[in-house]
Image: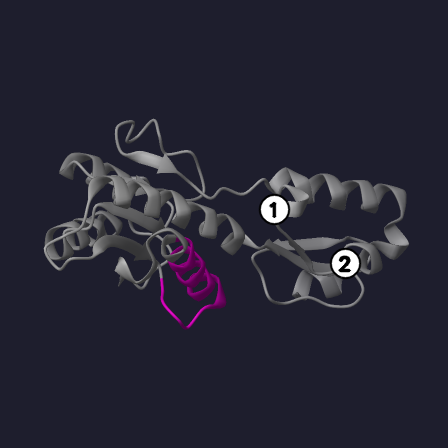
C-alpha cells in the first residue's frame, strides 16, 4: 500500500490480499470453495466405497490451516462438507483439525495422522500447501484430497483430486488490461474474484 502511493504510475496487484486503493492497487483471489465442493463429492464417493467406521458414519478428515476466523478456511470447510453430504447425507462425519498456521509440513502431517488414528478417517482433505497429509493418508492405507497442486506424485495410491488455482487466468486478464487500457485498469479489473466459470 505504501509503495502504491509512492509510485502512482505502477499498478500493484496482491494475491489473496485485502488492502487496496481506487487508483493503482487491487487484490485478487477466487472462489476456491467451488472446487472444494467438488473435492467433497470425490471424498464422499470414495468413503462410500470404503465403508463406514465403528461409529456407523463415513468418517472424513480435513486438515485446515485455520478455522472459522478466516472466510477462506471457513468457506472451504463448509463447501467440502456440503460436497461430502451431497453423496452421504447425514451418514457423513467430517472432522476438522486446525493447525493454526498457513504452512507447517510437520504439523500438517501430524494433524492428518491424528485424524486417521483418532477418528478412523478414510479420506483426508486439506487446506494447507504441503503434500504431507496426502503422504500420511497413503502410509495409513486411506485416501486424500490435496490442495494447491496435483499431489498424485507424492501419494500415487491415495490422492483422489485437488482444488487448484489457475493463476494465469487472472494474470492474462490483468496484464492485457494494463497494456490495452491502463487508465481504466481499476474499473475493468478491480477486486478480482474468479471461479470455475472463468476456469480460475
Neighbours of disc 2 within 10 Å: few (<14), some (14-19), many (20+): few
Query: Element under label 2?
Result: loop
Dots 1 and 2: beta carbons under 8 Å?
A: no
Would you say the magenta stretch is mainly helix, strand or loop?
helix
Using the image, tell me which numbered label, if any, was put on residue 196: 1
Q: Is residue 20 above or below residue 132?
A: below
Q: Is residue 94 visible?
A: no
Q: Nearer the viewer, residue 144 or 57?
A: 57
Give the residue at x 26% y 50%.
108
Residue sitting at the far bottom: 69
Q: Image point 53% across, 52% down: which residue?
A: 34
Residue span colored magenta: 66-83
Label of residue 93 in the image = none
List the residue tagged with mark 2.
7
Nearer to us of marks 1 and 2 is: 1
Residue 33 vertical position relative to residue 157 in the rendered view, above or below: below
Q: Is residue 163 visible?
A: yes
Residue 114 at what x, y percent from top left? 15, 54
Q: Tell which circle, 1 or 2, labels the residue nearer the N-terminal end.
A: 2
In the image, residue 69 above or below residue 181:
below
Amino acid at each position: 500500500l505504501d509503495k502504491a502511493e509512492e509510485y502512482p504510475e505502477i499498478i500493484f496487484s496482491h494475491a489473496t490480499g485485502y488492502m487496496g486503493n481506487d487508483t493503482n492497487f487491487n487484490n485478487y483471489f477466487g472462489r476456491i470453495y467451488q472446487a472444494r465442493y467438488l473435492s467433497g463429492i470425490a471424498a464422499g464417493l470414495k468413503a462410500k466405497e470404503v465403508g463406514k467406521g465403528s461409529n456407523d458414519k463415513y468418517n472424513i478428515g480435513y486438515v485446515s490451516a485455520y478455522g472459522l476466523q478466516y472466510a477462506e478456511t471457513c468457506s472451504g470447510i463448509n463447501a467440502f462438507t456440503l460436497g461430502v453430504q451431497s453423496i452421504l447425507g447425514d451418514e457423513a462425519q467430517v472432522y476438522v483439525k486446525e493447525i493454526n498456521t498457513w504452512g507447517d509440513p510437520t504439523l500438517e502431517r501430524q494433524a492428518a495422522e491424528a485424524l486417521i488414528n483418532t477418528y478412523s478417517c478414510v479420506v483426508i482433505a486439506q487446506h494447507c500447501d504441503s503434500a504431507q497429509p496426502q503422504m500420511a493418508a497413503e502410509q495409513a492405507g486411506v485416501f486424500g484430497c490435496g490442495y494447491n497442486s496435483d499431489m498424485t506424485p507424492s501419494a500415487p495410491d491415495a490422492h483422489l483430486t485437488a482444488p487448484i488455482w489457475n493463476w494465469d487466468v487472472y494474470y492474462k486478464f490483468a496484464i492485457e488490461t494494463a497494456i490495452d487500457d491502463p487508465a481504466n485498469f481499476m474499473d475493468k479489473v478491480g477486486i478480482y474474484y474468479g471461479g470455475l466459470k472463468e476456469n480460475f
